[in-house]
Amino acid sequence: MARPLIQMALDSLDFNQTVALADQVAPYVDIFEIGTPCIKYNGINLVKELRQRFPDKLLLVDLKTMDAGEYEAGAFYAEGADIVTVLGVSGLATIAGVIKAAKKHGAETQIDLINVDDKAYIAKESVKLGAQIVGIHTGLDAQAAGQTPFSDLNDIARLGLNVRISVAGGIKQATVQQVVEAGANIIVVGAAIYGAPSPAEAAREIRELVDAAAV
Ligand SMILES: O=C(CO)[C@H](O)[C@H](O)COP(=O)(O)O
């Protein structure tokens, strides 16, 4: 099995705290995600800062774009984002716009299936449009209501689409093996790392668990 990537969700609003957390966990993760609240609060300057500090990491900007796909995403690809997210609920025209912007910059697009009713349909259409990643995502509010991403992950993985699958939504040490075995290619972790007494130690544990599960 190809080694799944670990994506660190940087969900703080504070610019300096975000950079400091990225520094701590950098040895153990593959992708830095600038989370949606974080990018809204800090804007493009944080993309520039992380791009400059971490030239060898993949940088995902979690725009969760809902409209004006090409226009909105283009600016972030231009500053070095490797991946930008667009909402599956936005519709195929917006998804196509973000994919067009990504292609212009040799980058990738992730379709976030959060709150999509027919996830299989949007995933299939997104692949036809050229998306490289679909995201199974139980958001923070849905997590608080007791939901998890596991059943949706199994359903989308079973389709066998030619696309990488990202999974997000409360993933922690106890559930890493399950999502790797279900077929996730990108494991997104936020609170289980940034909420730990030692984020670096938590990230190291998750790295070990992901690598062990992928053997
Ligand atoms: O995109 C997000 C919320 O919309 C989060 O970044 C994502 O859910 C990962 O964080 P956690 O592991 O804490 O769920």
Image (cartoon, rainbow, N blue to C red):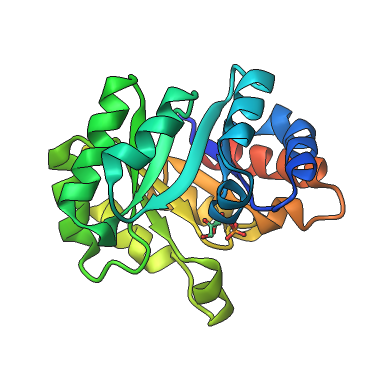
Q: Residue extending furthest right?
A: 197
User: Front-most of 7 and 47?
Assistant: 47
Q: Is residue 121 visible?
A: yes
Instruction: Identify the image quadrant of residue 101.
Output: top left
Position of residue 57 measured from the top left corner of the image (x, y, whole percent):
58, 24
Position of residue 46 measured from the top left corner of the image (x, y, whole percent):
63, 35
Tag count in the figure?
A: 0
Residue at the spot 53% in from the left edge and 82% down from the top edge = 145
Residue at the spot 16% in from the left edge and 51% down from the top edge = 92
Q: Quadrant of the N terminus?
A: top left
Q: Residue extending furthest bottom?
A: 145
User: Front-most of 12 and 186?
Assistant: 12
Residue at the spot 33% in from the left edge and 19% down from the top edge = 106
User: Front-most of 180 and 94?
Assistant: 94
Horizontal side of residue 58 vs 193, given as left or right: left
Position of residue 136 measured from the top left corner of the image (x, y, whole percent):
38, 57
Residue at the spot 68% in from the left edge and 58% down from the top edge = 191
Instruction: Identify the image quadrant of residue 116.
Output: bottom left
Q: Is residue 215 visible?
A: no
Ligand 1 lies in quarter: bottom right
Position of residue 83 measured from the top left corner of the image (x, y, whole percent):
42, 34
